[in-house]
Image (spheres, rainbow, N blue to C red):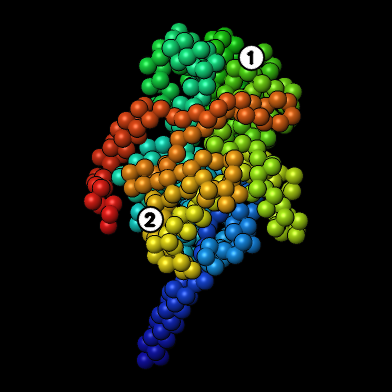
Amino acid sequence: MKLRTLVLAVAAVAAGASVVSTSAFAQAKEQFIPVLSYRTGPYGPNGAPWANGYVDYLKLVNARGGINGVKLSFEECETGYDTARSVECYERLKGKGASFVQPLSTGATFAITEKAPADKIPVVTIGYGRSESADGSVFKWNFPIAGTYWVAADAILQAIGKKEGGLDKLKGKKIALVYHDSPYGKEPIPLMQERAKMHGFDLQLLPVTAPGVEQKATWLQIRQARPDYVALWGWGVMNSTAIKEAQATGYPREKMYGVWWAGAEPDVKDVADGAKGYNAVTMQHGAEPQSKLVKDVLAQLHDKGQGTGPKDEVGQVLYMRGAMSAMLGVEGIRAAQDRFGKGKVMSGEQVRWGLENLNLTQPKLDALGFAGVMRPISTSCTDHMGAAWARIHTWDGKAWKFTSDWLQADEQIIKPLVKATAAKYAAEKKLTPRTPEDCQS
């Protein structure tokens, strides 16, 4: 009898705890955002400024009064750029009412993509992740907003083509892709292979084992093959190592083009003049020290001792990437509020709708502090990317400077590639793509 009473008591307490937890969530006054970051390990020097910009933007939103009065709360979880640890962080934080998750790793994106539909949490991947997830009819929960690796690769090849006097001049040229041997590094290969077939250039694939501190054999191959251009798809210490090896082997830095994760201050500052002339594609923004956003962050956070990370980092390339990534997620929440109720905490499913219905006009971006930093972005049910613009910036030995006009990825190449790859994924997973009618519900 005593045992039965004890069991009932425990059950009652558990039920009560469940009610309290659910009630607390229902009455929550803050919108929770998990922050998956890495400040340690070989990728820490690059991951930290991104995280600082991301967190600072969330703080800035609160300093501005929140989203229609709803304040943001967040919790950071260190992943070490490790897929398993990233998934652990996601699992630990998702139950706190996650608005969306930004894995900040292509490997983690692949893993979390499989969990998101059941968890009803949008997976936001600003400038990384699965390129085919731009197809919202198949990837309902994925949002590679503002650009994928296929956009980056296409922009790099367009820039090289312009330098040669036209894409037709690439025939017979050699282009080497030095890439991080991971899902991230392999992402640009399908697009580059497609362009190689179209324009008749020879594509040499050179994988580098993570973390990328040993590249002597790779650059020996480059010295022997003597490619006309090198595209660098690295991250963290791999980038500066590649530039140093190029310098040591005498490969011209002006013939090197990095992806946007290989074109920030940590990649070149230790090489300084040795990196002069090195190019990288940018995801719209570059270093933006004079932007209104930076001025607001300095005035409202850092000048009051509330900033994240070093003050002199504010406005640098990766800091701006983090701030931009946070802004796009926040604007998904704002768009959701416009439909489901201003001043209310949005569920992950409601935020998913908001991310799918972004309409960031230039006046809106300007008001948020991104004047001169970004172009308009507009997503839809079928288009979860929303923009395909990029620029090239070049290291002059002291700073990054824009050296190209705006470049728009060729949708006649990218869209069929996205459609075909997404259709293959849908077939493998036995998914039925959404129709326009489905999108109205």
Q: Earlier in the sequence, mark 1 or mark 2?
A: 1
Locate residue 414, reporting x and y percent: 38, 30
Location of residue 333 with respect to 431 vertically, above or below: below
Callout 1 amino acid: Tyr
| Residue depicted at x 54% and y 36% | 283
Q: Could one spot residue 262 in this view of the protein?
A: yes
Residue 353: image quadrant is bottom left
**Location of the C terminus (image quadrant):** bottom left
x 51%, y 12%: residue: 165
* Picture quarter with the N terminus: bottom left
Percent x, y for residue 127?
Answer: 50, 39
Between the residue at mark 1 and the residue at mark 2, the CA separation in whole angstroms equals: 48 Å
Pointer 1: what residue? 251
Tag of residue 440: none
Towards the viewer: 206 or 190: 190
The residue wearing badge 2 is: 353
Q: Residue at x 38, y 59 (%)?
A: 349
146 vs 226, left or right, is left
Please give the name of the residue rendered at 51% of the width and 45% of the height, measured from the top-left corner.
362
Horizontal side of 355 relative to 266 (left or right) equals left
